Image (cartoon, helix red, strand yellow):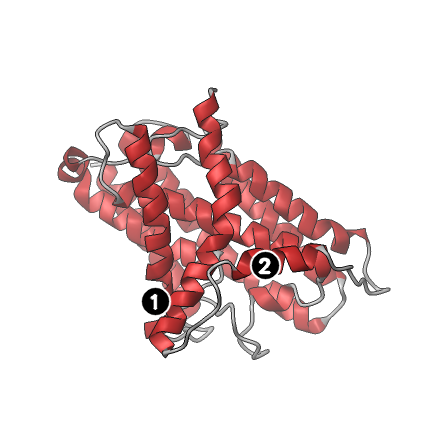
Amino acid sequence: MNALSFIPLLLALILSPLLFGVINRTKALFAGRRGQPLLQTYYDLWKLLRKGAVYSRTTTWIFRAGPMVGLAAAWVAATLVPLGNFPALIAFPADFLLFAGLLGLMRFFTVVAALDTGSSFEGMGASREVFFSALTEPALFVVLATLARQTGQLSLSTMFEPVSGADWLHGGPVLALVIIALMIVLLAENARIPVDDPNTHLELTMIHEVMVLDHSGPDFAFILYAAALKLWMLGALVLSMVLPSSGGNPWLSLALVSGGMFGLAVVIGVIESVMARLRLLVVPQLLIGAGAVATVALILTLR
């Protein structure tokens, strides 16, 4: 561990809320509107942290612990994610299992906090979240297993090193399939279109947003910030395979990935602007398709 290992974590903690601003401004541009300020998420977080939280008499300590545990899990997961040529703050063999487990822990406490309210409305969203996650997590694990097989490494910091032209010549089809599968996982894990619509308030289609309706004040700020961190972390993994290698220059690699992160936010905004949310019955087909694509990539590495 050295001082430079703190850079990926610091950038994630500072810049991750800005991704939501870029996505919203992109969507506003497509709609012909001015849109929110780029820093709107920071304003929202500050406003929520200054407010008080309201708790129902029917809830227990589980409801209060959910946002805090989710944010803590996101912070720990962020220490495992590299950025460009900068290794993660914490790296060890098979750390990708801990990373996936922490994402699952975030989801678990969000779900149980929603169930703790006793609301059938939030229970409906929790049920959908668990069902879709049961299809998304296998795709993520197969993607990680494919990269472990392809690179011969078991740590995220070495599995997701920036790829070079030689890597694409040697394993181009595998990398392309992994990127497709991981991009679908990113959209699903972050409740983005076409899996979920973060702006909807139609009760028949809400998934993630319905689970956090009863959270307020600092609790909702923790949830919003944890969501921004998750988007940043998964985006960093995608970009490590998309962006070209910087030839070993860590600072150039850092600039490429940082700029690419906001380019990815623009891509997400474009996706949400040009297509509608899929019907609930079609979403499982998309997630199973991501798992199938990842499985094909794994098979190609076993040849």
Q: Earlier in the sequence, mark 1 or mark 2?
A: 2
Residue designated by label 2: 43
Q: Position of residue 233 (x, y in %)?
A: 45, 44
Numbered disc 2: secondary structure: helix
Query: Horizontal and vertical percent for residue 5?
Result: 45, 27
Instruction: Give the residue drawn at x 82%, y 65%.
Output: 56
State the residue lying farthest toward the top: 1
In space, the residues marked 1 and 2 are separated at their CA atoms by 25 Å
- The amino acid marked with disc number 2 is Tyr
- Helix, strand or loop status at disc 1: helix
User: On screen, 15 above or below 268?
Assistant: above
**Looking at the image, which residue sits at the far right?**
57
Where's residue 284, x and y in %? 43, 65
The residue closer to the viewer here, 281 or 24, is 24
- Specify whether 290 is left or right of 21: left
Who is closer to the viewer here, 62 or 87? 87
Give the quarter of the image for residue 144: top left
Quarter of the figure with residue 44: bottom right
Q: Quadrant of residue 184?
A: bottom left
Answer left or right for 163 relative to 160: left
Reading the image, the residue beneath label 1 is 271
